[in-house]
Image (cartoon, rainbow, N blue to C red):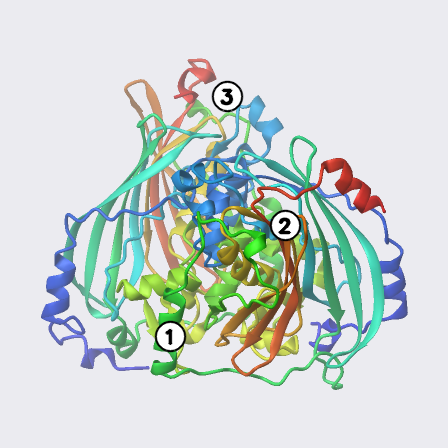
Amino acid sequence: MTDSTAVIPKPGFGLTDEIVARVAKRAGVRPARTPHFSEAARPSVHMWVKAIGSRNRLAFDETYARQSCYGTIVAPGTFLYAVDDTVHMPAEPTLASCYADVMWEFFHPLRLGTKLSAASAIDQVVVKDSALAGKAFHQTSTTEYTDGTGRLVARARPTLVSYDRESAVAIGRYAHVERYRFSADELDAISTAYDDEQIRGAEVRYAEEVRIGDTLGPVVRGPLTAEDVICFVERSCPPPTYEYFLDARRNGVGYSFTDEYGIPDSWSSALLLDDVAAREGVPVAHDYGPERVCWVEDTILNWAGDASFLRRLHVRLIAPTVHTHATWLRGEVTGLTEEDGAQVATVQVRGVNQSGTCTIEADAEIELQSLRVPVRATAIR
Amino acid sequence: MATVTDQMPGLTDEAIEEARSVLGRWFRRSWNSLEVTADAVRNSALALGDRNPLYTDPEYAADSPYGGLIAPPYMLAAIPPLHAAPKMRGIHWMYAGSDWTFYEPIRVGDTITSHARLVDLQVKEGRVGGRMVLQTGELLYVNQRGDLVASGAPTVMRTVRRRSDGKGLQYEPRRPSWTADELAELEDYQLARQRLGVKVRRAADVIVGEQLPVLKKGPFRAVDFALSGFDSQEGWYGFGQGAHVYQFLHRRRHPADAFKNPDSGLDDKAYRGHWEPYMAKQAGMPGMYDMGHHRGGLISQVVSDWAGDHAFMTRCNVVVRRPIVVGDVLSAEATVESVEPNGIVNLKLRGVIQNGDVVSDGHASIAMEATKAPQTTAEKLATKES
C-alpha cells in the first residue's frame, strides 16, 4: 500500500489551477437533460422497486394498493432517481466523482400515472482537503421534481465529490478493499434476514405507539453482484451506448478513457470491472451511490408502513460498497414531535458491511398517523 | 461446497426427454404483458444506438405516416419471455436468433401480451461444443384490441459449458485492439451515416442486387452489453427478476440457474459472462460477449435507416452464428434479393466483424410505402394455423 503521508501534503494535489478554474465556473449552471422516465407508469415503478430490492407492495400490487389510503399504486420517493439521477459530473477527463451526500425533501406521494419532470442547478463548487485524493471538489446542486401540473413534488440536494483519479490511486485510501468470501454461516444469516425482513405495509403505524429507541430493521442488501448494480443503473441512468456514446465523447463530456487495447470506454465500466474501478482508487467494481439511498428509504418505509409519509431523508455515503459486500441496515427512532398538527418521528439509520465498516449514515423525518384523527386525513396529500 | 465441475451437468437423454415433454404446450407466465410507454420506446432506441426519431421525438413522429411514436420492432425482445427454451437447468442458454414477423406497428399506449410455447427440439453434434440441443419456440404478441402485432420464432442453443474434461463449448480467447487512426476513421464513418427519414423510397425504384450502406457498430464494450438499459423495461432477463432479494429468491427456486464463483464463494448467474471475464471463460466464450437478443435490433437498423419512415418492416430473421466480444466492430450488411409485385422488398442480411468472421446472417422484408403488413388479422392467424 502506498505511503499516503508522502503525498497528501502536496497543495492542490492532482488539481491544476486550470481545472480548478474550469470546475469552479460550474456554479450557477443549469444542466438540462431528458428524463429517463417521465411518468410513474406501472412497468417503470414495478421494475424500479425490483431493482432496489424492495418488497413494498404498495408500489406494484394493484389489488393491494387499491385497498390502501391512496387507492392506487404509489412509487417510493426515490423513484425520482429514475426520472433524473441528480448526478451532474464535471466534464473533466482526469476527475472521478462519487455521490457523497444527499438531502431529499418529499412533498407529495408519487401516484401511478403522475407525469414527472426535473430541473437541476449547480449551487456551489468548493475545493476541500480530501483523505481520498489530497484535494477534491465538493459540488452541491439542487434538483427539483414537478408533476404534470407544475406542482413541486420533491427536491434533492446532493453533494458530489470529484477528485483526481491518479491521486486517489497513489494515496490508496481504499487500496485495502477487496472482495469478501462469506462463510456458510454468514450466508445463512443473510438468507435468514431476507426471509425475516419486517414490512409494516398496510398496518398503520400510529405516532402514539412509537417510542424513542424503537428499532428499524435489520434490512440486508447483497452480497452485491454486478447484476444488482446493472438492475439499478439500467433503470435510472444507463450510460450512453453506441452512437450516443460517440456523441458524448465528441462533445467532450469527459467521462471516457481509452483502455490498453485502444478502445474508448466510459468510466461507468467501474460498476462492472475491477480493473476500471482500480483506476479510480477502488480496487473492486462497486455500486452506483444513489442505490444505497434507496436502500435506506426502503428500510424506513418497511418500518413506517404505507400510511406514513417520508418527508425528509438525509443520507451520507461514507465508504465504498463493492461487489460481494453485504450491507446491513439498522436504525432507531431518535425523536417524536408534533409540528403544525403533524406527528413527526425522527429516525437514524446506519448501513454497515459484513466486516463492520459503516458505509452509510442517514437520518430522516416521517409523518405518522395519529390515533386522534382518521387515517385518510393526513395520508392523502 | 459445489465444485465448478459439479455446476456443469452433462446433456443427458433424460433431460432432453423432459424438455421434449412440454413441446406444443403454451407457457403460463405471470409477467407477460407490457404497457408501451413513450419512455420505454425512447429508451429501447437509445440502448441500441438507434437514431431514428420515430422512436424518440414525439413531434417528428406526429408528422410521420404513423401519426405518433411507435416502438422499434426489436423492442419486442424486451418483452418476456424472449424465447421458449424450457427445462435442462444447468445447461447453458445461447440465444441463436429469431425469425420475427411484424403485422402492425406497436404504438405508445398499447399493452402487448405475449404467448409462448416450445415447438421444436433437435439434438445436434455441434462443430465447436459437441452435443447440443436446439430449441425453437413460437411467440405471439397481441395488443389490447386482440390484434396480433407480431410473432417470433426464437431458437436457443443449449450446450454444456466448458468442462475440465475438455468437453463443451470452447472458443479461442479474443481481444481485438484498435489504433487511434483506425478509430478516428471508424468514428467519422459512423457519424456520417444518413437516414432516409421522411423521404419516400418506392419499391419500383429498388434494384435487385443493390447493396445498402453498411452500418458499423462498436468497438463493443461491456457497458454496451450490460448497462444499455435495453433490458430494463419489463426485461425478460435476470434484470427483470430484480436485484438483491429477488435474485436470492430466484436462486433458491432455481438452484441450477446459479453458478458459484470459486473466488467469492457466491452464487450468481451463469450468464454473467456477458460482463465478467471469468464466467465468459467458463462458458467457453472468446471473451465478454454480446447479448444475442440485441443482435437483431442492431443489424435491422441497416434496413430501417435505408427504407425510411414510409415503410414497414414485415420480417426480420437474424441468426446468431458466433459471439461478438468486447473490442469487436460489427459491420451490418444488407443486399436486395428480390422485389415483389405488392411492394415487398426482400433483403439478405449479414453481420461481419473486423477479422472477416460472419457472426450473423438472415433476411428482412420491407413493405415499401406502407405503415403495416399487407395482411389482415384473420389472414395472419390463418397463416399461423397452416
Q: Amino acid at mark 1?
A: Ala
| Image coordinates for residue A187, horizontal then vertical, percent | 60, 61
Where does label 1 land, which residue? A278
Query: At 75% from the left edge and 54% from the top edge, which residue is drawn?
Result: B84
| Image coordinates for residue B28, horizontal then vertical, percent | 77, 43
Label 2 is found on which chain of the structure?
B
Label 1 is found on which chain of the structure?
A
Give the total of numbered labels.
Answer: 3
Query: At 41% from the left edge and 63% from the top edge, which residue is drawn?
Result: B193
CA distance separating discs 3 and 2: 57 Å
Where does label 2 land, which residue? B343
Nearer the observer, B108 or A263: B108
CA distance separating discs 1 and 3: 48 Å
CA distance separating discs 2 and 1: 56 Å
Q: Is residue B28 above or below residue B291?
A: above
Q: Are marks 2 and 1 on the same chain?
A: no
Where does label 3 land, which residue? A69
